[in-house]
Amino acid sequence: MAQVKAPPLREFPSPQALLPGAMEKSRPYVASEKIQSAIGFAGELAEGWEQRAIGHMGTLLGKYRSLKVFMDSCVHCGACADKCHYFIGTQDPKNMPVARQDLMRSVYRRYFTLPGKLFPKLVGARDLTRDVLDEWYTYFNQCSECRRCSVFCPYGIDTAEVTMAAKEILDFVGYGQKYTNEIIGKVHRIGNNLGLPGPALADTLTGLEEDVKEETGVDVRFPLDEAGAEVLLVTPSADFFAEPHVDSLIGYAKVFHAAGIRWTLSSKASEAGNFGLFIGNYDQLRTIALRIREAALELGVKRIVVGECGHAWRVAYSFWNTLVGIGAGGRDPFALQLQRQLDPNVRQPTHICEFTWDLIQRGALKFDKDANDHRVVTFHDSCNVARGSGMGDLPGGQFEIPRAIIRAVANRYVDMASETTREKTFCCGGGGGLLTDELLDLRVKGALPRMEALRAVADRHGVNFMATICAICKAQFTKVLPYYGFKMNQVGGVHQLVSTAIRLNAH
Amino acid sequence: MSAASVFFALLFYAAAAVLLAGIALRVADYARTPAPLKIPTTPAPRTRGGVALRLAREVVFFESLFKGSVWTWIFGWLFHASLLLVLVRHLRYFTEPVWSWVVLVQPLGILVAFGMAIGLAGLLARRILVERIRYISVPSDYLMLALLLAIAGSGLAMKYVFRTDIVAVKAFFLGLLRFDWQPLPADPMLYIHLALVAALMIVFPFSKLLHVPGLFFSPSRNQADDPREARHLAPWAADLERGR
C-alpha cells in the first residue's frame, strides 16, 4: 500500500468510464479463528459452508423484510449506479450499488426463485462458489453502508441492508473481517472499541480536567460513574484521546458546566459506537446496546445523551428503543422499567447537538463568536446521521440543528454544494467498518467526491475547517485530507467550535 | 369454436390465475416477513399520514428516480403513465356498457400507445448506450423491454395495418368473464398480441416486475420516522427479549 495516491479532482463531476477489476485486490484482513469464535461465529470456512451459507441466507430472508423485498424489486434501472463514492473514486463497476447488490441477488435468484432455478443464465443467476464468496468478501467490504444509493432508488432499495446481510452470512460461515470483529470482541471484553480499561479512562479524564483548567482557569469536570447524575453521556471512545475528537469531548463538558447540569460518563458504557450494525447482526447490536441500558439503570440518570458519532446515533435514535427499550411508547415490562426512571418530558435518547441547541435557544449558553474567526467553517453531513436518523421535531432536523449551532458559535459559515450535502451527502470513505489501514487505498479514493466539494468551497470562500459529528469521519478525514492537499487539522467536531467560543463564567 | 379460440380461452384463464395467485402469494410473503428495525431513509415523515404521502409521491411521480436520473425518469415515467392509460382504455373490452370514465380516456388512447413505445425505446436505448447500465443488464432485462415493445407494437399494428374485428374480440373476453365462451377472430396479429400479453401476465410474479408490490413493502419508504416515540418490536425480536 506504499503507493496510495489520490485520484485527480474533477472540475465538473461527470460520468466516468468503467475500469472492471480495478479494486478486485482490495480486501481487508480476514478475522482469525480466535476473533471469530470470541463473538460466537464459526472460526473458519469448513466443509459444507455452501449449504450453511444458503441456509443462513434463507433464515435472513425470513427475518428481514428489507432483504426479501430488495432482492426481488430491483429492475436494473441504473439510477443508483453513479451515486456511490467508492464507484466514483475507483470506477470499478462492481462498486456500483446495483452491481454490488447483484453479487448477492444472483445467488438469491439461483437458490430462491423459479426462473433462477430453471434458466440461471437468462436472469443472471449463479451458484455460490468459492470464487463468488471471495467476491462477496472483496466488494461487500467496499461498501460503507452509507445509504446514499437508497435516496435515489425508485423502490428505496438500500444497499446497506444487502451488505449487512452479506457480512452476516460471511461471519456465519467463518469468513469474517478482522477489523470489525476484533473491535466487537473488545467492546465485550473491555467495554469500548479502543480497548481502554476503566482505570486508564479515569486517568485520561483527570488529565483533561487539568488541561482545561490550565487553558481556561475554570474547573470543568469530567465525571465518571457518578450515580445520581442527571445526564449519562455516551460517546465514542475515540473522544477520550484521539485528535481532533477529544476537543469535542471538552466541548460537551463545557456545555454541561456552563449550563450547570450534573452529568457523568460510564466506564461500563464507555462506547457509543456499535459495530454490530456494520455486520448486520441483531444479537451483537442488542448485546452491545444492553450495556447502555444497564449503565443508565445502575447510575439512576434521568437522561441519556449521545456524543458526536454517526453510526452510534443511528443505532441510538433508530434502534435503541427497539433493542433495549431506551425511548417512549413501550408497554412491556422491559421497556417500562427504564421509562419509569428516565425523564418523560425530553426525548430519549438525546443527541448532544439537540441538547446544546436546546440550551442555546433557551439562552442558557453565551458565546464569543469572534473566537472562531480564524476559521471559515463548512459542515460535512455524516451518512448515518443524515440518512439513518433524525433530530428535533421536524424531518431534516439532523441537517438544521448542527448548522444552527455552528452559526451560533462562529461568524463565518459556508455550505458545500447541495448535491453533496444533507440527504445527498457523500460518505467520508471510512464508514461501515472499513476504517482500517489495509484499506487505505479504498479510503483515499472513496473520499474523492467529498474532497472535490471541499476544494470548491476552500478555493471560492476560503473554507479552512470542516466540522462534522462523527468519530469515524474525523478519523478518516484526518488521515486522507493530506492526500488531497489539505491539512489534517482542517477537520473537527461541531462541539470543538462550541468549545472555542463558549463562555464558562455563567455559573 | 376454433381450436385457437379454445387455446386462448384456456391460456387467459391460466395466465390470470398465475398472475393473481403469484402476486397474492408474494404479497402475503412480504406481509408475513417482519421488518425488525426502523430503517426509513431519512429525512422521513414522522406520521403514517406522511408516509402515505411519501409513497403516493413515489407511485405517482417516481420522486426518488427523479432525484437519481432525469433521463431514466423521463422515459420510465412516460412508459408507466402511458401503460396505465392503455390499460384503462382496454377496460372497454371487458365492460358492457363501457364505464363513462373509461370513455373519457378514449381520445388519449392512441396517443399514449405511442408514448408507451417511445418510453420503452428510450429505456432500451439507455440500457444499450450507457456503459454503466449495459454492464448491469442481464438477458432478462432486454427480454422484458422487448416483450413490452412487442405488445405495444402488435397493438399499434392492429390499429393501423392488420385490423381485427374488435367487436368479436370484446365478445370473446366478455365470454371469458361470463364463462360463456365466444369465438376469437382468426387474425395472426391478434394472436401475437394476446400471446405476448399472456406471457407478460405469467412472467410477472416471478420477475423484477415484482417492483410493483415491492415498493409498498419497502421499509426504507413505508416506515414512519418515529423510533423514539413508539417501540417497534418484531415478533422474533420480542421472543429473543423474553428468552433473556
Image (spheres, rainbow, N blue to C red):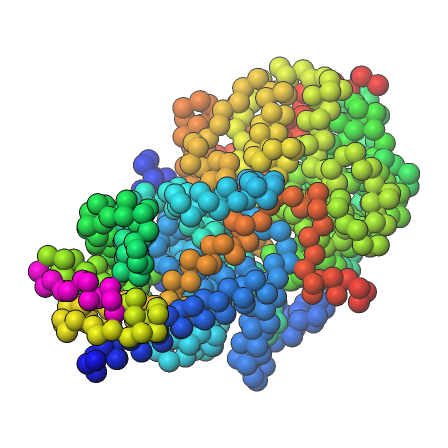
Q: Nearer the viewer, residue A329 or B107?
A: B107
Residue B163 percent location from the top left of the image: 11, 62
Which residue corresponds to the image point at 38% horizontal and 75% vertical from the top-left?
A115
Q: Quadrant of the N terminus of chain B?
A: bottom left
Residue A475 falls left or right of residue A39: left
Residue A348 percent location from the top left of the image: 75, 40
Residue B163 in magenta? yes
- Vertically, is A429 above or below A63? above
Q: From this viewpoint, is residue B233 visible?
A: yes
Q: Nearer the viewer, residue B119 or A289?
A: B119
Residues drawn in magenta:
B161-172
Instruction: Please identify the quarter of the rendering in which residue A176 is found.
Output: bottom right
Residue B102 falls left or right of residue A354: left
- Vertically, is A181 above or below A144? below
- Vertically, is A199 above or below A184? above
Residue A445 falls left or right of residue A266: left
Q: Quadrant of the C terminus of chain B?
A: bottom right
Instruction: Please identify the quarter of the rendering in which residue A302 is found.
Output: top right
Residue B54 in magenta? no
Which residue corresponds to the image point at 37% horizontal and 80% vertical from the top-left?
A118
Which residue corresponds to the image point at 21% horizontal and 52% vertical from the top-left?
B113
Q: Residue furthest left?
A: B161
Q: Nearer the viewer, residue A79 or A421?
A: A79
Residue A506 falls left or right of residue A178: right
Residue A90 percent location from the top left of the image: 39, 52
Residue A334 percent location from the top left of the image: 82, 55
